[in-house]
Amino acid sequence: MALPVVIVVGAAAVTGVMAVLTWLGIRKPTTEDKDKAKGKNVKQPDAEKPIPNDVILAVAHLRMHHATADEIVAAAEKADLAGHATLAPALRNEAAVLSAAEQFSEETALELTKDAVRFISPLSEANEEEWTKYVKLSRTHRGNAVSDNFRLGAYQLSARDLADAGFMTTAKKVEEEGHAVWVGEWAEEHSLEDFLKSPSEQYDALVALTKLHAGIIAEKHQDVIGTTIENEKVTLSGLLAVARKAGRGGLASWLKSAKERSSFRDTTERFKKLNGIF
C-alpha cells in the first residue's frame, strides 16, 4: 500500500475535527439555549434524538486525530448548545478517559518500579530500565494516530523513518496542503492499516531506527557525547531523540548550529526531555 493513502487518512482526520466543531456551530442558539445559558429551567432535549451520521464520523475522526481532552470537552460544550443530549456526555466521557490515560502514562514513565512492563534493551549503552524509560517517553501519541504532517503511530514515525527502519521501500518529500511531508511505499508484508493497529510492529520499527541512528552517532558524532549543549551534558539518549525528530542530516545541523537549535525548539525540547537517560 502506498503511503499517499496516509495523506487521505490525515486529511480526513483534520476534516473530521473541523466537521464536528463546524457542524455543532451551524445551529443558531434558540431561546431555550439562551435560557439554559442564563441558568433558567428548561425542558431537557430528547435523549433519543438521533445524531447525524456526519457528526458520528466527525467524533470518530476526533479520536483518530488524537484530539486533546480540552478539545473534546470544547466539542461537548457545543454539543450541549446544539441540543444533543446523547453526544455531549459521550464526548465528556471520552475526554475523562483520555485525561486519566495521559496522567497514568506520565506517572508510569516517571515511576518505572510501579509498572511491570519492561523492554529488553537493543543497545549495549542502555540497561533494561533505562531503555524502558526511553521507550515510554518516546510514546507521544495513541497507536492509531496520524499527525498533520503524516507521522504515524505511538512514536510518530515518518515515511523517512520507516524507510530507514526497513518498513518502507522508498521515501520522498512532497508538498501537501502547503507544507512538506514524507511519503513512501510500504515494504512487502507491511501496510498502513496493520502498522496503526499493531503496537509490536511500531515498537519493532522504533528499535530498528534507533539501532541505525546509534551506529551513525558512534561513527560520526561520538566526540559530542560528554560535551555541553543547551546547558546539558550530552548523552546518547539525547542525540537519539534529536535524530528521530530531525533525521540524520538534521542531527548534524542541530549539533553544529545554535541558530538551528533555537529555530527548531520542538527538536531541542525533545533532546532535553530524553537526554541523560543513558
Image (cartoon, rainbow, N blue to C red):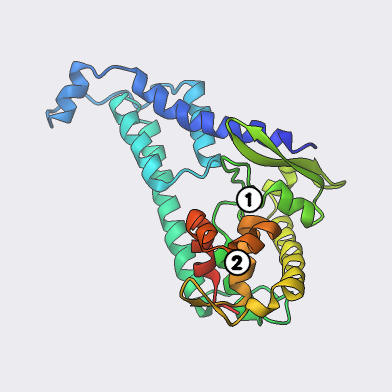
Task: Left or right? Give the position of 250 relative to 18.
Answer: right
- Whether 176 is drawn above or below 82: the answer is below
Residue at the (39%, 41%) spot, across then down: 71
- For disc 1, the marked residue is 153
Residue at disc 1, secondary structure: loop
How many marks on residues?
A: 2
For this orientation, the residue located farthest to the right is: 188
Q: Distance between the residues labelled 1 and 2?
A: 27 Å
Residue at disc 2, secondary structure: helix
Residue at the (48%, 58%) spot, across then down: 262
Where is residue 204 drawn, in percent x and y? 74, 61
Residue at the (40%, 32%) spot, across then down: 87
Sequence-first disc among 1 and 2: 1
Residue at the (72%, 54%) spot, across then down: 161
Task: Left or right? Give the position of 160 relative to 19.
Answer: right
Q: Which of marks 1 and 2 is in front?
A: 2
- For disc 2, the marked residue is 255
Q: Please, what is the three-letter code of the amino acid marked with disc 2?
A: Leu
Where is residue 264 drawn, in percent x and y? 52, 55
Task: Left or right? Give the position of 221 relative to 29.
Answer: right
Asked whether the beta carbons under mark 1 and mark 2 sit within 8 Å of each other, the answer is no
Res. 185 in view? yes
Where is residue 104 drawn, in percent x and y? 45, 64
